[in-house]
């Protein structure tokens, strides 16, 4: 069983400010999901390497070349808060 | 003019090149149909009429000069998960409600270079999390065969649009069933490619280890044309294979002599609807009659597929969705007073329940102390599942099974069930985790388990080995030469 306190901790790690009601809801939901996957523990995986990818491709390289780009303004325009050529953020340090 | 709705892409190509009709006329016709039927279906998030008409004129100029490719002047719709420069791309979410990308996804560029004509962006489950389109911030799409039912998902807007004749084909994406399941429920043909066969560059990421880009259309013959247009290596997506794209159209034949078909017994699960089971078994007999040999095979790991997926997918989602922070683009909370609150409140207000649930599940599965028990355990079981497919494909060329254990359910079933998607897609997820290519093709109609007296489409799933597109296309094509299920049209959308 996953506790409300754990859900609060996960929400903090995930950077989601959940309301008290949501903490309740997601505690129940997460326990449902974890209950569903419980059976997986019974599968014998002794000596099995965890799989990371299925393509079989390794060390895919491409030429490291600069390309002209004219999207700077459009990118900055997408930011919710901006000043001139900069994206504005709240202070990181107190 | 409306008769053109039911013509194949090949016939459209021929008609455009002969100047029987122009790309502009064709585009206007589909735009008019969207206007007429969209209120019933809600298949689209954004209709791009102005851009479509402009591209149509460019296509007509090219055709006038005798320069055309397979899809020049042919309209299509794109799931609203594909970045489109200058056209808002929402992932059907609040957090990206007003997001306007600065570049096109590679697949969009490829179609645009041919002057295929984008009609608009189709609805999906928010961030493609779901199997019903009900998690869309903009509300669900409706199934044209019965508008009180879901079209399936997450590519439900794309499949509803194609089924209702609002677009001759559509771009879609699949992570674990999101092309095959809605294709089955809407009675259209859908292609989920081998993982790495089509570039994902510019497509909003969900689960990077299984995300695949494919298409839905009205026949396998049409799917092959769209597949040849979008497949291939892309320097901007390191998972794309350098193996040359085969001319799959050359593998299409009317018979299936020499094809070895496996029928995995674990795919006929408890709870499969009786009509669905009957239709699939009838389809298998028709494939046999075309010259294929049929044998029963066993894939015992199938039962664990959805559980592996229920860990791997949220884990990768929690990582991929960490980029939505209210700083660089997208929605930002107006009540946040410091940096932590900008992240926290923006993400709480900007994401829907399903996205939050998956981010939370994934964050938990990857967090200190739980990674071994959940994430690594799942990836070990996933390897066993992949190996099992490899062994079976030593003995058979393709697998035949249902695309979905049921026909389209009523709207409203997904809302309060955190396991809805994992159960709805249990017959698609194992193949997705292994990166296998597959089709869903219409194979008849069945009554739903809820007792309603309504005939709804059933989808036959054709799974191939990794990079084995040619045989799934060949089997799907041959099957459609002797059946008419893919030509059936929903009433009221003529």
Image (cartoon, coloured by chain):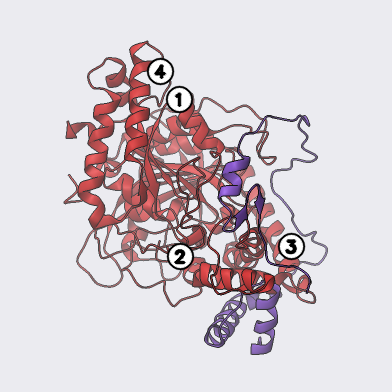
Chain colours: A purple, B red
Q: CA distance from mark 2 to mark 4?
A: 41 Å
Q: Earlier in the sequence, mark 4 or mark 3?
A: 4
Name the spot of residue B45 as percent of width and height, x first.
Answer: 37, 53
Q: Are marks 1 and 4 in contact (CB under 8 Å)?
A: no
Q: CA distance from mark 4 to mark 3?
A: 49 Å
Which residue is under mark 2? Answer: B424
Q: Are marks 4 and 3 in contact (CB under 8 Å)?
A: no
Residue at x 60% of width, y 68% of height: B310
Which residue is under mark 1? Answer: B114
The residue tagged with tag 3: helix, strand or loop?
Answer: helix
Question: Is residue B180 visible to us here?
Answer: yes
| Chain identifier of the residue bearing label 2 in the image | B
Which residue is under mark 3? Answer: B380
- Same chain for labels 4 and 3? Say yes or no: yes
- Same chain for labels 3 and 2? Say yes or no: yes
Which residue is under mark 4? Answer: B68
């Amino acid at each position: 069983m996953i506790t409300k306190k754990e859900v609060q901790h996960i929400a903090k790690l995930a950077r989601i400010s959940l309301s008290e009601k949501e903490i309740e809801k997601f505690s129940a939901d997460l326990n449902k999901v974890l209950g569903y996957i419980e059976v997986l523990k019974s599968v014998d995986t002794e000596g099995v390497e965890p799989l990371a990818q299925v393509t079989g491709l390794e060390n895919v390289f491409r030429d490291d070349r600069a390309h002209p780009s004219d999207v700077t303004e459009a990118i900055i325009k997408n930011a919710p808060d901006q000043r001139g050529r900069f994206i504005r953020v709240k202070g990181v340090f107190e | 003019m409306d008769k053109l709705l039911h013509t194949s892409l090949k016939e459209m190509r021929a008609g455009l090149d002969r100047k029987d009709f122009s790309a502009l006329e064709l585009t206007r016709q589909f735009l008019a149909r969207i206007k007429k039927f969209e209120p019933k279906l809600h298949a689209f998030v954004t209709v791009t009429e102005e851009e479509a008409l402009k591209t149509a004129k460019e296509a007509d100029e090219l055709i006038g000069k005798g320069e055309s490719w397979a899809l020049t002047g042919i309209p299509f719709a794109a799931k609203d998960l594909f970045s489109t420069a200058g056209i808002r791309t929402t992932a059907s979410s609040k957090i990206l409600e007003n997001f306007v990308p600065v570049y096109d996804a590679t697949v969009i560029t490829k179609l645009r270079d041919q002057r295929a004509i984008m009609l608009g962006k189709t609805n999906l489950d928010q961030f493609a999390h779901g199997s019903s389109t009900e998690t869309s911030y903009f509300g669900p799409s409706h199934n044209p065969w019965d508008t009180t039912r879901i079209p399936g998902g997450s590519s439900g807007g794309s499949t509803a649009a194609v089924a209702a004749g609002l677009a001759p084909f559509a771009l879609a994406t699949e992570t674990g069933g999101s092309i095959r399941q809605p294709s089955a429920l809407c009675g259209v043909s859908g292609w989920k490619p081998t993982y790495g066969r089509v570039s994902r560059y510019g497509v909003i990421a969900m689960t990077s280890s299984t995300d695949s880009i494919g298409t839905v259309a009205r026949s396998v013959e049409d799917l092959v044309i769209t597949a040849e247009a979008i497949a291939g290596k892309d320097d901007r997506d390191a998972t794309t294979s350098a193996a040359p794209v085969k001319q799959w159209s050359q593998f299409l034949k009317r018979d299936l002599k020499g094809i070895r078909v496996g029928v995995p017994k674990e795919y006929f699960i408890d709870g499969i609807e009786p009509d669905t089971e009957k239709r699939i078994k009838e389809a298998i007999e028709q494939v046999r009659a075309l010259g294929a040999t049929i044998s029963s095979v066993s894939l015992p790991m199938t039962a664990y597929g959805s559980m592996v997926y229920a860990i791997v997918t949220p884990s990768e989602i929690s990582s991929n969705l960490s980029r939505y922070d209210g700083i660089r683009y997208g929605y930002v909370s107006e009540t946040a007073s410091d940096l932590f609150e900008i992240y926290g409140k923006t993400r709480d207000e900007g994401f829907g329940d399903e996205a939050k649930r998956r981010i939370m599940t994934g964050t938990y599965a990857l967090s200190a102390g739980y990674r071994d028990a959940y994430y690594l355990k799942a990836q070990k079981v996933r390897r066993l599942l992949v190996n099992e497919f490899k062994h079976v494909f030593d003995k058979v060329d393709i697998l035949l099974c249902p695309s979905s254990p049921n026909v389209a359910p009523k709207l409203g079933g997904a809302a309060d069930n955190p396991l809805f998607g994992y159960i709805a897609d249990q017959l698609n997820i194992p193949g997705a985790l292994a990166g296998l290519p597959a089709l869903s093709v219409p194979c008849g109609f069945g009554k739903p388990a809820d007792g309603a007296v309504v005939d709804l489409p059933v989808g036959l799933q054709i799974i191939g080995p990794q990079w084995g597109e040619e045989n799934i296309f060949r089997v799907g094509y041959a099957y459609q030469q002797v059946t008419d299920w893919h030509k059936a049209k929903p009433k009221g959308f003529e």
